[in-house]
Amino acid sequence: MAGAAAEGKNFLGVPVYRPRVAFFELSSCEGCQLQLLNNEATLLDFLSLVEVVNFREGMSGGTDDYEIAFVEGSVTRSDEVERLKKIRANAKVLVAFGSCACFGGVNQLKNRFSPDWVKKEVYGDHPVETSPARPLEDFVTIDLRIFGCPVKKEEVEKIVAGIAIGTAIAYPKYPVCMECKANGNICLFDVGEPCLGPVTRAGCDSWCPNNRAGCWGCRGPADDINIEQMISIMDKHGFTKDTIMDRLECFGGFAAYAGQLRESLNAEDRG
Ligand code: SF4
Ligand code: SF4
Ligand code: SF4
C-alpha cells in the first residue's frame, strides 16, 4: 500500500501534500481498520490523499517515520502503554480511532467485574496480563477523535481529507435522531424497540435505525443532552432501567451519566 516518499497529488484539481499516516491497534477487534479496506470504491481516492506507511491489515513492513497515527483499541496491558507513548512521541497528530480508543469501547464492559474473576472466566488457567480497559487519553494527549464502533468510513475519509488539505474538523453536535428523521425512518420506539438516538452524537447517518435496530450509543453523547428525558422516554415506552443501563454502559461513552444512574439504581435496590 505504501508508495514512494510523500509527494504532490491532486485533490479536486488542487495539488496537495500527502501526509504519511500509520495505523496501529491496541486491544481491539481491528474492525475499525477493516472499515477502511471495506469500501473499495473509494479506497484509491483515500490513498491519493495520504501515504500509508504502517497498516498491518493492508500491507507488510512499516516504519516509525510518520506524521499522523491512527490508534485503534483500548489500553489493557503495560506493554500497550509503552507502545502508545512511543507512537505519541513519533506522531505530530494522534487520532483516537474508534470507540475503544475514545472511550474504552466494548472492552470496558469488563471493568465492572473483578480483574481476577475476568482472568479466570476468560483465560482459565492460562496466565495473561489484562487490566481494566482504558481510553488512550488516560495515558497520552489526543489530537483528534473518530467515534463509532466501528468508525464510519465516509466520516474517516472526510476527516483525513480535512487534515490533508488543512480545513477545520467539525463533529456533529446534534443527536442521531436528526439524521434518522432526515432519512425518513419510522421511529423505532413506535414499533417497540429501545433506542439511544435522542442522546447519541450523530455522524453515522443513523446507521442502526436505518436497518431497523435501535441505537446503542457507540459514538458517545451529543452536546447538551438531557439524560433524564431519555430515561423518561424509555420509561414511557415500558423499558426497564436495566435496558437503559445495558445501552448506556455498552461502549463507555456515557460513563459519566451511567455511573450516576447505576448509583441511584443500586440505592433504590438497597431500599
Ligand atoms: S471500536 Fe468497535 S469495531 Fe473498532 S476496534 Fe473497537 S470493538 Fe472493534
Ligand atoms: S428510531 Fe431512534 S434515532 Fe430514530 S427517531 Fe426514533 S429515537 Fe431517534
Ligand atoms: S446508530 Fe447509534 S449505535 Fe448505531 S452506529 Fe450510530 S451511534 Fe452507533
Image: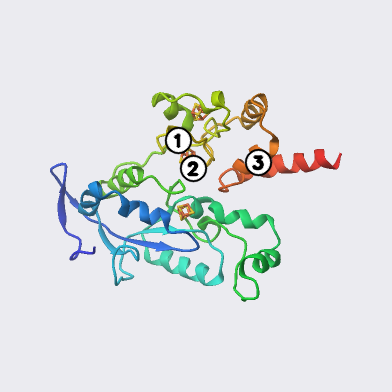
Q: Which residue is mark 1?
A: 202
Quarter of image, res 135? bottom right
**SS at mark 1 in the image:** loop
Does mark 2 have its CB less than 8 Å from ligand 3?
A: yes
Secondary element at image label 2 = loop
Say which quadrant the C terminus sits in: top right
| Residue type indicated by callout 1 | Ala
The residue tagged 2 is 219
Q: Is residue 122 above or below residue 270?
A: below
Disc 1 within 8 angstroms of ligand 3 (CB): yes
Q: Residue at x 18, y 66 (%)?
A: 4
90 vs 271, nearest the viewer = 271
Considering every residue shown, the one lying at the far right of the view is 271
Placement of 150 over or under 1, stated as above or below: above
Towards the viewer: 74 or 29: 29
Please tell me the numbered disc located at residue 245: 3
